[in-house]
Amino acid sequence: MFKKILIANRGEIALRVIRTCKEMGISTVAVYSTADKNSLHVRFADEAVCIGPPKSSDSYLSIPRIMAAMEITNADAIHPGYGFLAENADFAEVCKEYGVKFIGPTPWMINQMGDKITAKETMIKAGVPVVPGSGGLVLDVTHARKISKDIGYPVIMKATAGGGGKGMRVVWNEKDLEDLWHKARQEAKASFGNDGIYIEKFIEEPRHIEFQIVGDQHGHVVHLSERECSIQRRHQKLLEESPSPFLDESLRNKMGKAAIKAGKAINYEGVGTIEFLVDKHKNFYFMEMNTRIQVEHPVTEEVIDHDLIKEQIKVAAGIPISGKNYFPNGHAIECRINAEDPYNNFRPSPGTITSFHSPKGHGVRVDTHVYAGYTIPPYYDSMIAKLICKAPTREDCIKKMQRALDEFIVEGVNTTIPFHKKLMQDPKFRSGDFHTGFLESFKLED
């Protein structure tokens, strides 16, 4: 087992990793930018190293600075969290060269799943259902027209190196294709330095349902059931839950088997997520794989009573997994509490928190790195907390979440708490009748 782990991240996920490490008797090293010197992950780590100014490229994305922090603290493993360098194959390769364990998959595995076209080809070979599409990069507008006509409109253009909704355009008819083709390529180039585009059939009214998997160094891969992630705004998740109100036992078993096939196709090592689109007829298609821990991992932890960060660390240390699949016991919902103004198009709301009270009680969990007096910097993601509730049934869980949201006090900045309160009251959400386009017609105020 590792003696000291450096957490190459910030905020709540860094604090989350520190907590598990302490329970496992492992020393921790926090890294931080000057903007994060007062964050709780810095305070509660055994050691902390400042790695640069607020700009991410000069701190949390700087591989040389993180490796320097590793050297001076003599850490023997690095946990990347999510975001930043978590899915950076070059970073994993540098860790390997330095003889420090990257707590995650190998560089090859990251590359195999990081490029969406390569990932899709891998899934086809493994027998995992995929969305009909171009089967590779689309070369030009003429090629795009032919592919789109063969697939049938509507289609969606996607950046091969993409994520977070960047470089994506839905094309409903041929007359709009050329304009949207150029816009997708320009955005992809600006966001990822790669203007490669591929085309897929656009699935109308889809559900976004993902399966948590774990693979060890001994060839075993299991699934830990699913999470429903269809409540999204501009392809960014706002709420997740487990189990999905859309899946029945038969579909859950089919998707679970497909998720295991996907993991075994690359002999996956570590904790990862297989993301699927599921249409209204309950056909499911592989979308992508995230080769890291997810923001929403607590909902899975709550319904299977399992510490996924601990599982990550054990797998990285070479310890075999149990070899059994897990299924939900009860229901869990996670609301992402962002420092954003939901009444003003979710505009970011950095600033100083003047008052902070987190809800408590049976079945209520809050993962956060903030407190009263903490100043939210404007340089990073706006999420300041995750509120997770667990109850025997989905209906009970929604009621518990309503109570917890009423107790959640954050003053000094705007947050998404009012949005989540309204969502909990929405009849369609409460009945489970929603899809990824649900929020397009959702109104915060009547």
Image (spheres, rainbow, N blue to C red):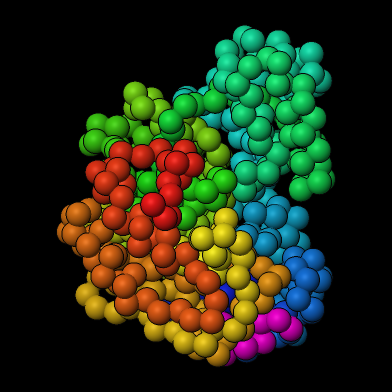
Q: Residue at x 77, y 41 (%)?
A: 187
Give the quadrant of residue 296.
bottom left
- For image coordinates 63% across by 74% down, the residue present is 350
Q: Residue 390's image quarter?
A: bottom left
| Percent coordinates x, y for residue 351 in the rendering | 62, 79
User: In the shown orientation, is residue 173 left or right of residue 145?
Assistant: left
User: In screen coordinates, is 138 left or right of 335?
Assistant: right
The answer to whether any part of residue 67 appears in the image is: no
- Count the marks: 0
Query: Is residue 89 something one can see in this rendering?
Result: yes
From what the image shows, is residue 45 above or below residue 284?
Answer: below
Q: Which residues are magenta?
A: 34-43
Residue 82: x %, y % from top left? 58, 61
Q: Quick check: is 154 in the magenta stretch?
A: no
Q: Residue at x 74, y 83 (%)?
A: 34
> Residue 37, located in which quarter of the rendered image?
bottom right
- Determine whether 441 is above or below 306 in the image: above
Judge whether 49 appears above or below 2 on screen: below
Tell me what residue is drawn at x 60 percent, y 21 percent: 172
From the viewer's perspective, tell me whether residue 440 is left or right of residue 54: left
- Percent position (x, y) of residue 407? 32, 77
Image position of 243 with respect to 155: above or below = below
Residue 40 part of the magenta-drawn span: yes
Q: Main secondary structure of the magenta part?
A: helix
**Foreground residue among 276 and 120:** 276
Residue 14 point in image, percent of width and height? 56, 74
Viewer-closest of 321 and 416: 416
